[in-house]
Image (tube, rainbow, N blue to C red):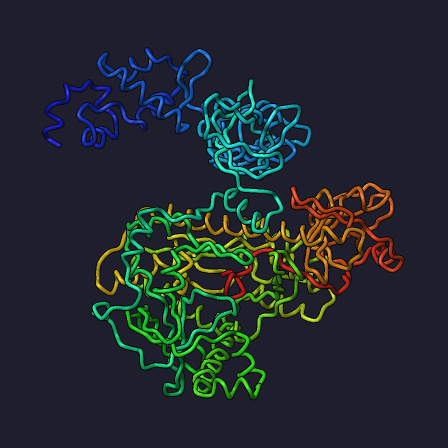
Amino acid sequence: MSNKKSRVPKLSRIRSADPHLEREMAKYDHPLPSREYVLEMLGAGDAVPQSFDDLCALLDVQEFERETFQRRLGAMARDGQLLQNRRGDWLIPDKADLIRGRIQGHPDGFGFLVPEEGGDDVFLGSKEMDKVLHGDKAIVRIIGIDRKGRPEGKIVEVTERANVRLVGRVFNEHGVWFVEAENRRISQDILIAPQQKGDRKALKPEAGQVVMVEILEQPSRQSQPIGKVVEILGNYADPGMEIEIALRKHDLPFEFSREAELQTKKLPDAVRKSDWKGREDITGLPLVTIDGETARDFDDAVYCEPQGKGFRLIVAIADVSHYVGAGSALDQDAYDRGNSVYFPRRVIPMLPEKLSNGLCSLNPQVERLCMVCDMSIAATGAVKRYRFYPAVMFSHARLTYTEVAAAIYENDAETRKKLAPLLPQLENLNTVFRLLLKAREKRGAIDFDTAETRMVFDDHGKIERIEAYERNDAHRLIEECMLAANVCASEFLHEHEHPTLYRVHPEPKPSKVEKLREFLATFGLQLAGGDSPKAKDYAKLLESIQGRPDKVLLQTVMLRSLQQAVYSPDNVGHFGLAYESYTHFTSPIRRYPDLLVHRSIKAVLQPEQYQPGDWDEIGLHCSATERRADEATRDVEAWLKCYYMQDRIGEEFSGSISSVVPFGIFVALDDVFIEGLIHISDLGRDYFHFDEAAHAIVGERTGVRYRLADRIRVQLVRVDLEQNKIDFRLVTDPMIKAVAEVSSHVERPGKYRKQEGKSVKHGMRH
C-alpha cells in the first residue's frame, strides 16, 4: 500500500475527506472519489442535479482523471445509483422521486415495477411496457394514480435487461414471422430478423413449432424486440415437449458443464480403500433405505436398536461432500441448479447420474461413504445425546414405503416373511417413530392434513389417469427420523458457532394473523397466543376443528396465514415445526443447502472454518432455485392435465372451491384432482363482489355466496393448451343452488387438494 500512496499526487482537502479513501487507495494506483462519496456530495443539503463539469469541480477531479471518472459515473448509472436527466445532469434517483425496481409483466400487456426498497408496486400501462420485458430492471417516475388507486409510473431508464434467450412458438402472419413467448408475462411478440443472404446455417422453423430465440435488439418505444432462432425444439404436442419448454422458460440448467463432466469421469466407480481413512466402520450394522418405488437416488439410510430404556437411532446420509469439493466445477454446477427437479417421468438431477444414482447413492449391497448422525432417544422421544462422524456403511436392503407399511402396520404375512431378517430393527424404528411423534405433539408442531396425487402415464407419455396417493405411516416414520437428524445438525452448528444455512420459517405476519382472527371470529373460534401466536396455538385450534363440516375451509385459511420457509444464515427458528433451530442435512444428493451443511459439520470436526462466500446471498439463491423448481413442475403438470382433459369437454364433475379471486372461483375436481376456473361472469345474472376477508364472492342482488371449500358441480367448457387453462361453467343443480343461496357459516364437507408445498420425497415441505 505504501508504494501506491507514493504514486498518488497530493490530495486536496475535498478529496482527503472521502470516507472510503483508504479502500480506494488500496485498490487503485490513482484513486477516484468513491461511489459513496459521490452520492454523499450529490445528496448533501440543498444539492441539485450537477453537470459533469460542475461535479468534477465539486469533487476536485483533475483533468487527467476526467475520462476515468466519467466511466465510474456510467457504472453507477448502470447499477441504478445515479441517473442523467435530459440536460445530461447527474442526480440521485431518490432525490427526483424516482423508484428503482424489477419489472413484472402481465399477460394482458400492462405490468408493474416491484420496488427494490419495498413499498407499493407501481402500475405501468401497456405503452410503458412496450419498452421493457418481464424481469428487466428499470427506474420509474411516479406520474399519478391509476383508476384503481395504485401509483402509476413512467419508465425513465432501463438499467438491466433480464432476457437474452426465450422459448416460444413461431407464427407467420401476412409474411411476418414472429415468436410468441411461452412465458405469458412477456406479452410482446419477438420479430424474427430476416435471413441474411448466404447464411446457410440459419434455422428455418415451421409455423407452430417451438423454438429458442436469441434477442438481438431489446424493445424500445419505437420498436418491438427482434430475435434470431437458435434452436428448434419440435412440435408443441410432441411427447416430453412440455418439459423441454419448462426447462427453458424457467432458465433451469439441464446440461452439465464440460468441466463438471470431465471431473465426473475421473471419479471412481466404487469406494476405494484409501477413502476409509479417518472413518468409522459401520458396515456390520443392518442399515436400510426406505423410499418410494420409483426413487433412484438414495440419500438416507436408517438403523435402530434398544439402548437402556430408550433407543439408539442412526441416520446415515450420503457423503456427497467427499466427492464434490468446494469451488470445483461440480460444485459450481450444483450451486447453479440449487436442487434436483422432479418432473413427471423425468428428473433433472443436481449432480451427474454417476454420482446421484451411483457413487453417492446408498444403493443396496455396496459400500458407501456417509456422514452419520448417531442419536440416543429417550423414552420421552427427546434426543438425549447425538454425535456426528464420517463413516463407511453397507445398505442391507432397499425397501419401499409400501412394503414396510405392509409388514409393520398391516401385518401382511407374505411381506413379513420376505423381510423376516429385518423385522426386529423395523419394529424398533416404529417404536422410535411413535416416541418422536409424541414429542412432536408435545412440542406443538403444526400438522395440516394434505392430499397427494400421482399421475399414471400411458406408453405415449400422456396421462392415463390421476389418482389419490395416501402417505402411510412408513412415510411418516422416515420423516420423523430425518427431522430428528436435521435438528441435531442445526444444534451442532449453532452450539459451535459455525455459520451455515438454516431452514427458517418465520412467524406469521401480524397483518395475516389479524385477518385470520377476524375470519375465525365469524365462526365463534379464537386463535390463542395474543399478538404473537405460536405453533402450538395453531395446533390446538386445528385439533378443536376436527370433525367439523367446515374443517377444510378453516384449515385452508389457517395455512394461508403462514409465511413460506426459506434458507437463511440467520437462525430465527422454524415456526411450523416448532423448532428453535432447524436446518437441512439429510438430502445432499438433491439439495445444495444440505451439501453446505455437511461441509460445515466437517469443518467443526476437523476443526477449521468453512466459508463458501456470502451466506445471505447463497440463502437467497437456494430459496430462489427451490421456487423456480416448484414453478417449473407446476407448469408441466398443468399442461399434462390440460392435455388429459381436452377430450372431456362437455362432461360434468363434482368438486370443491379451492380458491376465490376477484375474477372468479377455482374449482378442484373430486375424482380427477384437476383445477379450473369459473369466471365471475359465469356465476349468474348478478353483480358479484369479492369479499377477501370471508374468502368468498357474493351476489349483490341475490345474496348468493360462493366460498372457499364449498361443494359445487361444474361442466368442462374449454381447455386451452397454450395458456394451460381449464374453464368450467356452473351446473344449475337445484340442491346445490338452494344450498348456495343460504347465507350461513356452516360449510359443506368436501375434499380439498393443497396445490403447493408438496415434497418430492417425504410428503411435507419443511
Vertical placement of residue 1 versus 685, above or below: above
User: Residue placed at 67% from the left, 70% from the top?
Assistant: 546
For the residue pair 169 and 636, the one nearer the viewer reads as 169
Residue 366 spot, x, y in % from top left: 34, 74
Asked whether the viewer can see residue 282, the reply is yes
Residue 563 spot, x, y in % from top left: 53, 53
Q: Is residue 632 left or right of residue 255?
A: right
- The quarter holding residue 324 reads bottom left
- The quarter holding residue 304 reads bottom left
The residue furthest right is 734
Asked whether the viewer can see residue 141, the reply is no
Q: Is residue 364 left or right of residue 708?
A: left
Badge count? 0
For the residue pair 302 and 206, the one nearer the viewer reads as 206
Quarter placement of the N terminus: top left
Residue 7 spot, x, y in % from top left: 12, 23
User: Residue placed at 28% from the left, 50% from the top?
Assistant: 327
Residue 527 spot, x, y in % from top left: 62, 61
Q: Is residue 235 left or right of residue 97?
A: right
For the residue pair 206 and 365, the one nearer the viewer reads as 206
User: Residue placed at 58% from the left, 27% from the top?
Assistant: 129
User: Residue placed at 66% from the left, 53% from the top?
Assistant: 641
